[in-house]
Image (cartoon, grey):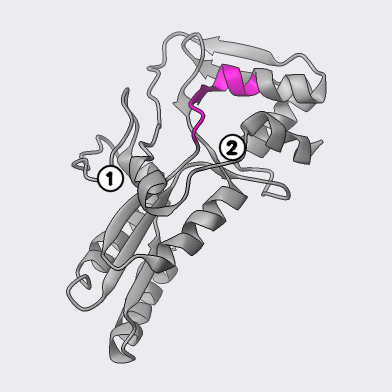
Amino acid sequence: MFSVNLNALAECLDWSVQNGVKQFVYTSSGGIYGSGGNAFFEDDLLTVEGPLGYYLASKRCGELLVENYSKLMNVIILRPFFIYGKEQRADMLIPRLINKVRHHEPINLSGENGLKINPIHVSDAVRAMKSCLDLETSEKINLAGEEIMSLREIGNKIGQVLHKEPVFELDEQTANNDLIADITKMKTMLVKPEIIFKSAIEEFK
């Protein structure tokens, strides 16, 4: 993982500088913020408590590496939050929740409603990524959707589309930490998300 996410990244950055590339786009992850009660802004100080895990740690290190090249070319760091869409891997969050509702398996919630997120449909994410090619400055930008939903709300929306009653299992002992992106920069500098979550779930039927 670190060989690809860091060693290969360093080689790409060096190649870009040597060949006169003017702009470098790096896709990181919204997960590097950790979790909390408020929406995360791009300029927030990253002070995650506890281990990030190998994948997110490699993404954070990747950001630090990319930032060091900002004097040599424009670098765009994108932080996507819960991208979803048709034919996504079954182990990703939204397909996993859909399968749980479809098979009447319980969705585990921290607290009454579970964490809140604002997932983004893959088509909106792609539009944003294409749009960032027009930027002329180095930027960090969150990529996420307009709708902020708890896991309970997501489960209920999925159930409405699939015509199945979702099953929830509450864990009152676990802290409910949200993972919400502020998308002001995305809407101002790139694109506004267009896809409505409930409509997009029709793709999975």
Image coordinates for residue 190, horizontal then vertical, percent: 42, 53
Q: Quadrant of the N terminus?
A: bottom left
Marks 2 and 1, the one that precedes in the sequence: 1
- Say if residue 41 shows up in the picture: yes
In the rendered view, does 133 fall on the left or right side of 70? right
Residue 70 image-quadrant placement: bottom left
In the rendered view, does 32 fall on the left or right side of 201? left
Image coordinates for residue 38, horizontal then vertical, percent: 31, 25
In the rendered view, does 141 fall on the left or right side of 67? right
Q: Which mark is residue 64?
A: none
Residue at which label 1 appears? 42
- At mark 1, the secondary structure is loop
Q: Which mark is residue 93?
A: 2
- At mark 2, the secondary structure is helix
Q: Amino acid at mark 2?
A: Leu
67 lies above or below 162: below
Identify the residue at image location x=52%, y=23%. Answer: 149
Image coordinates for residue 90, horizontal then vertical, percent: 69, 44
Between 160 and 191, the residue placed more toward the observer is: 191
The local crowd at label 2, few if under 14, some if 14 to 19, many if 20 or more residues have their Cα within 10 Å, is some
69 lies above or below 132: below
Image coordinates for residue 175, horizontal then vertical, percent: 37, 17
In the rendered view, does 166 fall on the left or right side of 22? right
Q: Amino acid at mark 1?
A: Glu
Segment tinted magenta in the rendering: 146-155
The local crowd at label 1, few if under 14, some if 14 to 19, many if 20 or more residues have their Cα within 10 Å, is many
Between 198 and 99, the residue placed more toward the observer is: 198
- Say if residue 52 shows up in the picture: no
Identify the residue at image location x=48%, y=44%. Answer: 192
109 lies above or below 203: above
